[in-house]
Image (cartoon, grey):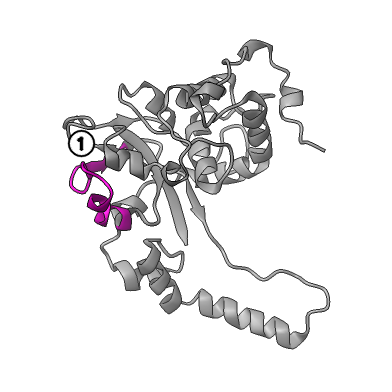
Amino acid sequence: MIQNVLMLYRTDEYGTNGETLSFEHWADIVDCGYSWYRQNKVGGTANTNINSAILYAFTDPDSEAGGISIEGWKTLWAYCANGVYSSADDYKYGFDPLNNGDVAVSTYYSSSLYGKIDAAAETSEHPLTDCWALVDIADGTYYIAEYIGILDRDGRTDEETEAVKAFAEWFGSAEVQAAWAEEFDSFPCNTEAAALVYGDDIPEIYTIENFALKTVEGTDMTYAAYVAEHSSEWTNIQTNLGFFWADADSAVAEPDWENLDWATLTQSAE
């Protein structure tokens, strides 16, 4: 299955009041002039992918700050410091605050989006059923693909291996992947399954350009590979500097960016 992170906004009086939002980069959210929701913790697949999308514009292979320019970390800090958030478990993703009218702009993941929109009126007095749009971002968005594979395991018999292969082939079949896509609003990697579900009418959220596959300037890596290479460093930086506080009372002071020991901040805990 293919999944991506999305940036959505309200077009009504609780949002932009009809103004169209167009950005060059995901990071432009910090200068958009509207309130936005941000996640409240370091870690988690959705949170990490949103951060990867925001940091995309700031890749710098020569930077000692985890391959991201200092300006990139300042921007991510501004995203945290000025964003709306909640520590409530049922409010940790971006759809609910947008649906409630608490923010004008938010981020969410593609799977389950349409199901959420269909049920929007059940949880809000100001549902965004007919008043939402995707922020037009020139870069595109960050896609991830979810795979099924067979792991090597000592002592597994030939019969067991064949059973595992049979399950993988069944689960990855067009029929099963089509059924999964319909249930969870995902887009199948299996092209036959995608044709069964969508035909030629592919949802807009899956036609956005994928910058995960673009080559990072100064390297021979795609951005997806670049993220994989640096993700542990990015997690360490965010954790050590106190990004994504969940309580306003626990917010920490903005770091002194020009005098940080990046070698220590990116070092993995032993």
Residue 59 in view: yes
Expressed as whole percent of the image width and height from the top left, the position of residue 17 reads 17, 30
> Can you say whether 104 is above or below 96 in the image?
above
Residue at (36, 54) in percent of width and height: 206
- Secondary element under disc 1, as helix, strand or loop, is loop
- Which of the 4 image quarters holds residue 28? top left
Residue position for label 1: 11
Expressed as whole percent of the image width and height from the top left, the position of residue 90 reads 43, 46
Residue sitting nearer the eye, 218 or 188: 188
Report the side of 187 relative to 61 (left or right): left
Density class for disc 1 (Cα within 10 Å; few <14, some 14-19, many ≥20) is many
Query: Is 7 inside the magenta-drawn segment?
Result: no
> Can you say whether 58 is above or below 226 in the image?
above
> Which amino acid, by three-letter code, is at mark 1?
Thr
Residue at (61, 40) in percent of width and height: 226
Expressed as whole percent of the image width and height from the top left, the position of residue 160 reads 72, 84
Residue reaching furthest bottom? 159
Residue at (29, 52) in percent of width and height: 204
Tell how many labels: 1
Residue sitting nearer the eye, 15 or 225: 15
> Can you say whether 74 is above or below 207 in the image?
above
